[in-house]
């Protein structure tokens, strides 16, 4: 299949999904036209609660939820064929992710910007909050630790990316001052900031930064040393008000997304190579059954529970008007769908680097031999770092079609991945801080209610998990739980939204269908995984799997009781 056909199909589906379906959800289901004072105005404090223009907030929300997941998931899933991956990305984005993301944002804003766990306590029942928070804390712990490892791997593999990523922090700090202290319009300063970032991307090729010497002095490998540096930076980053660093950097990254996707899709239109991945490949050697595992392998880029944490954790505190939940929540889901589409286009072709340094070229191999080296079997296909590398090579190939040298193209692609992953990590640690503070409030632990101490505990938890193994790979001990726990959280968020809609006598069919589908597929996959963990004697995975599964089933039971009660109440009123 020609990559141009795949791109046009995905782009048209996303366009009509946002134009038509998101408007239906906004107007008839979530009633986003309601006039209410949002928490950003009601509790404005200049730190976490900051009324924000929807364009800037879209950038923050998108880059916080994107990270590496919408790249890695589709890049792994093409082992089952490009068609199943494409259909789940497109249908999942339009009918599940957009509904889930904008719904979680809407629900949090209507409940004083409280987390999805706290909102569930009110809607589903008092026992659900603790269960929700345990699942959320475990999910955030995995995300923060693994994304630090991914960034460390990319810094070591692409040392030319270190300078532009570091420069982006300084540029964002300056941009934040201009936007919020000087009250300058956002567009042109952000364009200048983006141009400066691209200048540093070019300089990065000539000034690669490595910390091998520091790593040896500390008795660490380079990746672990980068993980430590990243968490030190993150501690200070989460202490800053959102307008100083998080918002302006994410706004720049939003521009990066547009430019990056433009390069990929323009390259597709000019080069339009044939996809080397098969149309369908349901019997891939060593792979689990595509049903249900396709639907947990591609999470971000179709539907992801992590989005409900961001929506109800940081974004809800910055939403200027309720109606902005459509462009910010649903719109960011569409943006992530485009990113997942680019991952299928990049990982689905067969390319390799030829030559080194400035003479390097990205060469297409029409016979598919290079693609097969990555996807010969499940073990080869499911590697986290390898799939990011496949994406970077694919982007570099498309960039070469518009005259960008392979070396600069690969650094550009790696900077995009790192920027998104770093933003997700920053937001994830900030969310973990909020969850720990909620634990402090629940159990009257005053030290955990402190911003500084909660931030420190959040950082130390993720850092401690990451450095348990060389190369920052400690998080991989429990990473196999990410797909199922993440999708389970998405289903539970949709359950919470559905019960609230029922209580308000609003239509529920638009949330019930994706909720049932996601919960069935995820619990099915969890039971298969649990059976395998029992056979392999993996005690840690068995313990956490049972904890997550039993907690989720309890929440579902509480949710079904609340739904029946709300139905009886609605019938009585009618």
Image (tube, rainbow, N blue to C red):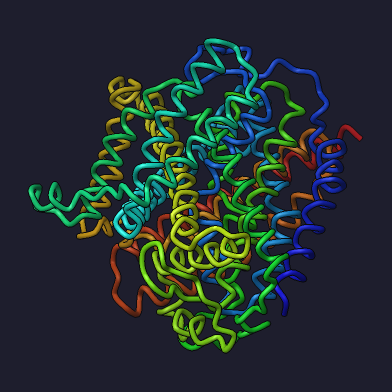
Report the front residue among 268 and 257.
268
Q: Quadrant of the N terminus?
A: bottom right
Q: Is residue 522 visible?
A: no
Residue depicted at 70% across the width and 15% down the height: 37
Residue situated furthest front in the rendering = 359
User: Is 230 displayed left or right of 52 in the figure?
Assistant: left
User: Is 451 displayed left or right of 467 in the figure?
Assistant: right
Residue depicted at 57% across the width and 55% down the height: 300
Q: Quadrant of the C terminus?
A: top right
Picture coordinates of residue 165 (x, y %)? 40, 41
* Res. 281 image quadrant: bottom right
The image shows residue 93, relative to residue 184, as above or below, that is: below
Report the front residue among 331 and 353.
353
What is the total number of numbered labels drawn onto the structure image?
0
Picture coordinates of residue 78 (x, y %)? 58, 74
* Res. 236 image quadrant: top left
The image shows residue 541, relative to residue 245, as above or below, that is: below
The image shows residue 256, relative to residue 548, as above or below, that is: above
Residue depicted at 49% across the width and 55% down the height: 413
Q: Is residue 349 visible?
A: yes
Residue situated furthest right in the rendering = 574
Report the front residue among 513 and 153.
153
Picture coordinates of residue 26 (x, y %)? 81, 37
Picture coordinates of residue 15 (x, y %)? 81, 51
């Amino acid at each position: 299949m020609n990559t141009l056909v795949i791109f046009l199909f995905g782009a048209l589906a996303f366009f009509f999904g946002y134009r038509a379906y998101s408007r239906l959800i906004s107007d008839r289901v979530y009633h986003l036209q309601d006039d209410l004072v949002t928490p950003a105005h009601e509790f404005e404090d200049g730190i976490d609660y900051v009324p924000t223009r929807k364009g800037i907030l879209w950038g923050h929300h998108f880059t916080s939820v994107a990270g590496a997941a919408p790249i890695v998931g589709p890049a792994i899933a093409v082992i089952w064929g490009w068609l199943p991956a494409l259909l789940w990305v497109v249908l999942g984005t339009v009918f599940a992710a957009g509904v889930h993301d904008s719904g979680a944002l809407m629900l949090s804003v209507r409940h004083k910007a409280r987390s999805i766990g706290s909102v569930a306590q009110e809607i589903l029942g008092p026992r659900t909050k603790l269960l929700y928070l345990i699942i959320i804390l475990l999910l955030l712990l995995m995300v923060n630790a693994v994304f630090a490892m991914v960034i460390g791997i990319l810094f070591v593999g692409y040392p030319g990316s270190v300078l532009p990523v570091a420069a982006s922090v300084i540029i964002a700090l300056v941009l934040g001052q201009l936007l919020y202290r000087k009250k300058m319009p956002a567009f042109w300063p952000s364009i200048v900031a983006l141009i400066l970032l691209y200048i540093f991307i070019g300089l990065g090729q000539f000034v690669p930064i490595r910390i091998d010497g520091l790593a040896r002095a500390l008795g660490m490998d380079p990746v672990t040393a980068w993980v430590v540096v990243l968490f030190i930076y993150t501690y200070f980053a989460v202490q800053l008000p959102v307008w100083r660093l998080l918002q302006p950097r994410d706004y720049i990254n939003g521009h990066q997304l547009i430019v990056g996707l433009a390069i990929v899709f323009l390259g597709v239109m000019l080069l339009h190579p044939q996809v080397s991945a098969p149309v369908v490949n349901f019997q891939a050697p060593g792979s689990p059954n595509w049903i249900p595992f396709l639907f947990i392998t591609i999470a971000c880029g179709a539907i992801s529970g992590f989005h409900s944490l961001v929506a109800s954790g940081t974004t809800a505190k910055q939403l200027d008007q309720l109606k902005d939940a459509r462009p910010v929540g649903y719109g960011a889901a569409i943006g992530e769908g485009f990113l997942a589409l680019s991952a299928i286009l990049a990982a689905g072709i067969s390319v390799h680097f030829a030559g080194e340094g400035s003479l390097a070229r990205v060469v297409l191999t029409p016979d598919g031999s290079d693609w097969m080296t990555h996807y010969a079997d499940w073990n080869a296909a499911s590697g986290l770092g390898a799939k990011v590398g496949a994406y970077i090579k694919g982007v570099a190939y498309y960039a070469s079609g518009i005259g960008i040298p392979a070396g600069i193209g690969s650094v550009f692609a790696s900077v995009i991945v790192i920027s998104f992953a770093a933003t997700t990590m920053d937001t994830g640690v900030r969310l973990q801080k909020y969850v720990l503070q909620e634990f402090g409030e629940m159990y009257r632990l005053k030290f955990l209610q402190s911003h500084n101490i909660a931030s420190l505990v959040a950082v130390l938890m993720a850092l401690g998990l990451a450095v348990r193994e060389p190369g920052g790979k400690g998080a991989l001990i429990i990473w196999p739980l990410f797909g199922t726990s993440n999708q389970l959280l998405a289903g539970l968020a949709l359950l919470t939204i559905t019960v609230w809609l029922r209580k308000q006598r609003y239509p529920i069919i638009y949330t019930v269908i994706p909720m049932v589908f996601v919960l069935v597929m995820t619990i099915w996959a969890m039971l298969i995984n649990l059976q395998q963990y029992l056979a392999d004697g993996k005690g840690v995975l068995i313990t956490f799997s049972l904890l997550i599964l039993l907690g989720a089933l309890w929440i579902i039971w509480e949710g079904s009781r609340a739904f029946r009660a709300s139905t009886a109440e609605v019938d009585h009123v009618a």
